[in-house]
Structure formats: structure tokens, C-alpha cells
Image: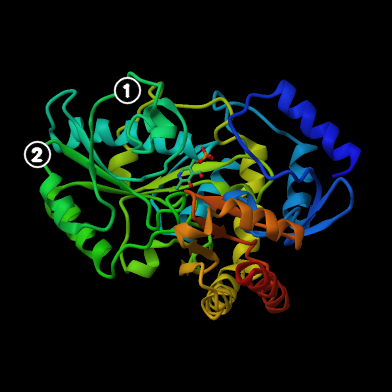
């Protein structure tokens, strides 16, 4: 470690809250799938800022859209209208097949917005008794870090010491259709679920699970809210991960890559009935729907389709997953994933995934351990076959050792 790196890490540690434990690499530049540290070392980014940089670092067309808009108008608040919002609505609605859009900033805000809207929908449209609305959520869910959300997390690190929490949530195991059926009551207004549980270790539910969920939601008048903040916008090889399941959610949450990696933008996408319950003054955000955010999101969506990043995610994901599965290693328990949302789960005897991520860093790959034994792999969707093959060589060397 050079003195510059050590000094920056020491200052960060001394002055910052210790709510993260990053790998000791200090990055100063990014382009496409690569990032460079302050000492000029190059790395292949296999995390993509938790899938917020699907389009690759500093994509020139998103950058140009951002600079152009930043020179014209950046923020109006929603007290006035701006000339980017309508175009953003049109384009995201067309791409995702949605009828109504509510723009926010972070992913957690989109989740909180959906919870608010769906509770109100429960009272006003479904006829649930006041303050009795229940939302079913999954064990090991990850939907963000705000108070409402950590209150229904099952991860002790996320919730211990932060109570009291809001009531109104029931838990079911992810992927268990009978448990979901059994948890439904007359007060159930929504089922909030990730199509693939990302933070829990890239867990994919059994085939047919989501078709069953869709059917139960429809027959019981329950709003199906899919949190596609991580899985959406090409990450799994489709625009939305729901396409793999052949279903359509009633409410879809997107964020992360809607920013192109430049500036936080999230959105709640829904049919007219659910978002229609929100009236002026009942919800909002100073920055939500601002012209800079809209211009960036429009460019971020445009390049995803124009440059076939979604198709590339499907093809390169298949190549990456096949290559990982072929690595002969007695510490690999399972390789799983969809598109470029991949994970290698190690045998607990391997001593945790963190040290393998550190070894990968030494070989020029930045990947992240999650939940102890899993290495999560999610490169930008612009990765090429040669880059995948090079990455596989590094994974093989580290996992074989
Ligand atoms: C599935 C899912 N939902 C919500 C969030 C929260 O997004 P943000 O960190 O932008 O608040 C995340 C972030 O990792 C996520 O993966």
C-alpha cells in the first residue's frame, strides 16, 4: 500500500462513521468495466456499485446528457414543472409497460413510497379496516436501510438496536408458495418481494413460484410489488427479471442503474389504481423528478437498449456462469445466477468469502463478499467475451489455491 492510499484510508477511518468495511482500494477513475486506484492500478469491476453501473463507468452518452442538462436547468422542485419529466415518464413507461410513474431518488425511497401507496390503496380501494393493512415480506429480504424498511428486515445487523419499528408486516420464507398462501389474511394489501434475493446471496426461487404468487395475488386482490432495484434494467439479461417468470407485477420498483451510475434516480412504476390514490400534498421529494435526474435516466435507459446491453448481459452471463461452474475446486459449493447477476457460494470450511475477494483484488478483480460465504459477481453489462475469459482465469487461480 502506498503512502497516499494509507493516508486516505486513515483519514476516512478517523473522520467517517464506520458503517462500511470496504476493501482497501481507493479508486479515482473509471471507464467501461474498469476502474483505477490512486496508484494507477487497473481493476475489472465485478460489483458495478451493487448494479448501479450496469451501463459501465462514465458512459460517454450519459455523461454528455448530464453535462448538457446541467448547463441548462438542474432543479425546479415539483412546485413547478420541467421539460424533462414528461419525456422520462413516456420513455420508462413504454420500456417497462407501466401506466403510472412516481420518481424518487434512492432505492429505499422507492420502497417506502410503494409501502405508503399500497397501504392507502388497501384502505380506499380494497376496503381494509383503517390501520389494519398488512404487507407480506420475505425472510432474508433486502429493500434498503431506512427505518420503515429495517423494521421488517430479518437481518440482525440491519435491525438490532434501531427499534421501535412500525407494525403491519408478516414474514414468509422466500420461494415457499404454501407459506405465502397461509400468510394471506383479509387485511393483506401487498406482497413485497425481490425476484432474486441479491443481498441474501443471489437466491433464485423454484421454477413456477412466481406464477403461483401472481395467481394468489390476483385471486385475493393483493398488490404484487416486485423490488427490481437490483435485478431490473438488464442485470439478469432481461429488462426486468419478472420476464423470466412470465408474470407482470402490479408495482415495480427500479433504481440503481436508472442513474447510469451518475446520480441517484429511482421510480415506482405501477398501474393507475395503486399510484392513483396519492393526491397532491400526500407524498413527494424535493429532488424527485428533477430535470437533471430525468435527463440522466433517459440517457441511461436509451443506451441500455441502443447498445444491446440487455442481450449482452444474457450472453456474457451464460458464458461467465458456465466458466465458473467448470472451475474444479473443493471449496466451491454452488455457482448460481441469471444474466450477469452471479454468485459463487463457498464451502463454510473455506473460512469466508472476504479473503478470496482480497485475493481477487490482488489479481485485478473487484468483487464483493456477501453473507459470509458468497462471492457476488456483477460486472457492468458492457463486458466482452475476452474480459469474461480473463476474469475466469483469475477466479480459477484464486479458487483453486
Ligand atoms: C433489492 C434492493 N432494494 C432496495 C435497495 C436500496 O437501494 P438504495 O441503496 O438506493 O436505497 C437495494 C440496494 O442494494 C436493493 O438491492
- Position of 313 with respect to 30 (left or right) is left
Mark 2 = which residue?
Answer: 186
Residue 305 picture location, percent across and down: 59, 66
The quarter of the image holding the C terminus is bottom right
* Mark 2 or mark 1, whichever is nearer to me: 1
- Position of 328 with respect to 25 (left or right) is left
Residue 207 picture location, percent across and down: 28, 70
Asked if the residue at label 2 sits under 8 Å from ligand 1, the reply is: no
- Position of 56 with respect to 167 (left or right) is right
Residue 276 picture location, percent across and down: 32, 37
Crowd class of label 2 (few under 14; some 14 to 19; many from 20; radius 10 Å): some
Between 138 and 210, the one lying in front of the other is 138
Q: Relative to residue 196, is residue 399 depicted above or below?
A: below
Q: Relative to residue 147, is residue 387 depicted above or below?
A: below
Residue 306 occupies quadrant: bottom right
Between 13 and 301, the one lying in front of the other is 13
The quarter of the image holding the N terminus is top right
Query: Mark 1 falls on what kind of element?
Result: loop
Residue 333 occupies quadrant: bottom left
Is the residue under label 1 in contact with that under label 2 (CB below 8 Å)?
Answer: no
Query: Mark 2 falls on what kind of element?
Result: loop
- Position of 42 with respect to 398 (left or right) is right
Q: Is residue 51 visible?
A: no
The disc placed on residue 52 is none
For the point 49% across and 55% down, the residue is 373
Residue 188 picture location, percent across and down: 17, 39
Q: CA distance from mark 2 to mark 1?
A: 23 Å
In this figure, what is the number of numbered marks?
2
Q: Residue furthest front?
A: 349
Mark 1 = which residue?
Answer: 165
Q: Relative to residue 169, is residue 178 depicted above or below?
A: below
Amino acid at each position: 500500500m502506498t503512502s497516499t492510499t494509507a493516508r486516505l484510508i486513515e483519514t476516512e477511518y478517523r473522520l467517517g462513521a464506520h458503517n462500511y468495511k470496504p476493501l482497501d482500494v481507493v479508486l479515482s477513475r473509471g471507464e467501461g468495466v474498469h476502474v483505477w486506484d490512486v496508484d494507477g492500478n487497473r481493476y475489472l469491476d465485478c460489483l458495478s456499485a451493487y448494479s448501479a453501473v450496469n451501463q459501465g463507468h462514465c458512459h460517454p452518452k450519459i455523461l454528455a446528457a448530464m453535462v448538457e442538462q446541467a448547463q441548462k436547468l438542474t432543479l425546479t422542485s415539483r412546485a413547478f414543472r420541467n421539460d424533462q419529466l414528461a419525456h422520462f415518464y413516456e420513455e420508462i413507461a413504454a420500456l417497462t409497460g407501466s401506466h403510472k410513474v412516481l420518481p424518487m431518488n434512492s432505492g429505499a425511497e422507492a420502497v417506502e413510497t410503494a409501502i405508503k401507496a399500497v397501504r392507502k390503496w388497501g384502505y380506499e380501494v380494497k376496503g381494509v379496516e383503517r390501520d389494519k393493512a398488512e404487507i407480506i415480506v420475505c425472510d432474508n429480504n433486502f429493500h434498503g436501510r431506512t427505518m420503515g424498511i429495517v423494521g421488517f428486515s430479518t437481518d440482525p445487523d440491519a435491525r438490532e438496536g434501531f427499534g421501535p419499528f412500525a407494525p403491519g408486516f408478516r414474514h414468509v420464507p422466500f420461494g415457499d408458495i404454501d407459506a405465502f398462501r397461509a400468510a394471506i389474511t383479509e387485511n393483506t394489501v401487498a406482497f413485497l418481494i425481490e425476484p432474486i434475493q441479491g443481498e441474501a446471496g443471489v437466491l433464485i426461487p423454484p421454477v413456477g413460484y412466481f406464477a403461483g404468487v401472481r395467481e394468489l395475488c390476483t385471486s385475493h386482490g393483493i398488490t404484487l410489488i416486485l423490488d427490481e432495484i437490483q435485478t431490473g434494467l438488464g442485470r439478469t439479461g432481461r429488462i426486468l427479471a419478472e420476464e423470466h417468470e412470465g408474470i407482470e407485477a402490479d408495482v415495480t420498483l427500479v433504481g440503481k442503474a436508472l442513474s447510469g451510475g451518475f446520480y441517484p434516480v429511482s421510480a415506482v412504476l405501477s398501474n393507475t389504481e395503486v399510484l392513483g390514490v396519492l393526491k397532491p400534498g400526500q407524498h413527494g421529494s424535493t429532488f424527485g423528478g428533477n430535470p437533471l435526474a430525468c435527463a440522466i435516466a433517459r440517457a441511461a435507459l436509451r443506451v441500455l437498449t441502443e447498445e444491446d446491453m440487455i442481450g449482452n448481459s444474457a450472453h456474457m452471463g451464460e458464458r461467465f456462469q458456465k466458466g465458473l461452474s467448470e472451475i474444479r475446486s473443493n471449496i466451491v459449493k454452488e455457482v448460481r445466477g441469471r444474466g450477469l447477476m452471479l454468485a459463487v457460494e463457498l464451502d463454510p470450511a473455506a473460512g469466508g468469502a472476504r479473503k478470496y475477494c482480497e485475493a481477487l483484488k490482488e489479481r485485478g478483480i473487484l468483487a464483493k463478499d456477501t453473507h459470509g460465504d458468497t462471492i457476488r459477481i456483477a460486472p457492468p453489462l458492457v463486458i466482452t467475451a475476452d474480459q469474461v475469459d480473463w476474469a475466469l482465469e483469475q477466479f480459477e487461480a484464486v479458487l483453486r489455491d
